[in-house]
């Protein structure tokens, strides 16, 4: 399943990066704060649905089942991620912030690709870790592990430690607060609790990314 996770993350990262950074097709449609929160972006919804599935059927259950993954902070992250993705996917009603999901459910997944390899040879996974050690420090496998660790560290630091909080506090939070200030008819029936939920989780995620970075 690690390989599958890697391919899914690669797909999400590619789609998110291309749409968020290199496409001008959405500039007119999502040009106001309320547009970016209320209007539905099909690709953003799709990426959010994938994230919901990954958290609901893989990351969260494994966090409870496998001792090596049973970390309270990571479990809280998985549950919060599920709730946030479910909101942008429209799992509980109207999608909230599906445009922003291009970044949060897509582009940031770039760091997950090297992480899948780093996790394989983590000392917590003794069989794979011992296998790598048996090959010696001069082996290609050891060099590959070193490369993926460096790649993950750089991706995580830049994407999640710097860009993620920047996007949250300069774009996401202002968009949410502006939309929440509108009348119920102007925000098209989108509930305040759903917006305040994703506002809260995004701020907590930002602090968590900074802590981990």
Image (tube, helix red, strand yellow):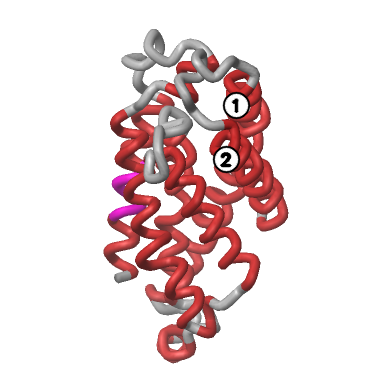
State the image coordinates of residue 33 (x, y, percent, origin top left): 54, 17
Label 1, label 2: how many angstroms apart (C-alpha)? 9 Å
**Does any portion of residue 63 appear in the rendered image?**
yes
Q: Quadrant of the N terminus?
A: bottom left
Of 132 and 24, which appears nearest the observer?
Answer: 24
112 lies above or below 42: below
Of 57 and 206, which appears nearest the observer?
Answer: 57
Of 33 and 16, which appears nearest the observer?
Answer: 33
State the image coordinates of residue 141 (x, y, percent, origin top left): 39, 75
Q: Main secondary structure of the magenta part?
A: helix
Q: Name the disc covering residue 176, or none.
A: 1
* Relative horizontal placement of residue 138, taking residue 10 as reference (left or right): right
Seen at 42% across and 28% down, the residue is: 99
**Does any portion of residue 102 appear in the rendered image?**
no
* Badge 1 element: helix
Seen at 40% across and 12% down, the residue is: 27
Residue 167 falls in image quadrant: top right
State the image coordinates of residue 199 (x, y, percent, origin top left): 62, 37
Disc with the residue nearer the chain's start (1 vs 2) = 1
State the image coordinates of residue 138 (x, y, percent, origin top left): 46, 78
* Relative horizontal placement of residue 108, taking residue 7 as reference (left or right): right
User: What is the span of residues highlighted in magenta in the rendered image?
Assistant: 8-13
* Relative horizontal placement of residue 152, taking residue 95 as reference (left or right): right
* Relative horizontal placement of residue 67, taking residue 205 as reference (left or right): left
* Badge 2 element: helix
Seen at 33% across and 47% down, the residue is: 49
162 lies above or below 27: below
Seen at 42% across and 26% down, the residue is: 21
Circles 1 and 2: CB atoms closer than 8 Å: yes
């Amino acid at each position: 399943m690690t390989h599958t996770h890697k391919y899914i993350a690669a797909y999400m990262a590619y789609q998110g990066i291309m749409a968020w950074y290199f496409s001008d097709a959405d500039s007119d449609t999502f040009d106001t704060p309320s547009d970016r929160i209320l209007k539905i972006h099909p690709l953003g919804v799709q990426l959010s649905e994938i994230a919901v599935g990954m958290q609901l059927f893989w990351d969260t259950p494994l966090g409870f089942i496998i001792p090596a993954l049973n970390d309270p902070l990571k479990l809280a992250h998985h549950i919060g991620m599920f709730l946030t993705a479910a909101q942008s996917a429209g799992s509980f009603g109207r999608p909230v912030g599906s445009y922003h999901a291009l970044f949060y459910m897509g582009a940031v997944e770039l760091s997950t690709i090297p992480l899948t390899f780093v996790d394989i040879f983590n000392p917590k996974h003794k069989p794979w870790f011992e296998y790598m050690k048996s090959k010696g420090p001069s082996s290609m496998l050891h060099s590959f592990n070193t490369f993926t660790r460096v790649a993950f560290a750089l991706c995580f630091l830049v994407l999640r430690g710097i860009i993620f909080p920047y996007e949250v506090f300069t774009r996401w939070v202002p968009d949410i607060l502006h939309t929440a200030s509108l009348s119920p008819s102007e925000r098209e029936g989108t509930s305040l609790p759903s917006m305040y939920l994703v506002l809260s989780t995004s701020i907590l995620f930002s602090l968590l990314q900074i802590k981990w970075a």
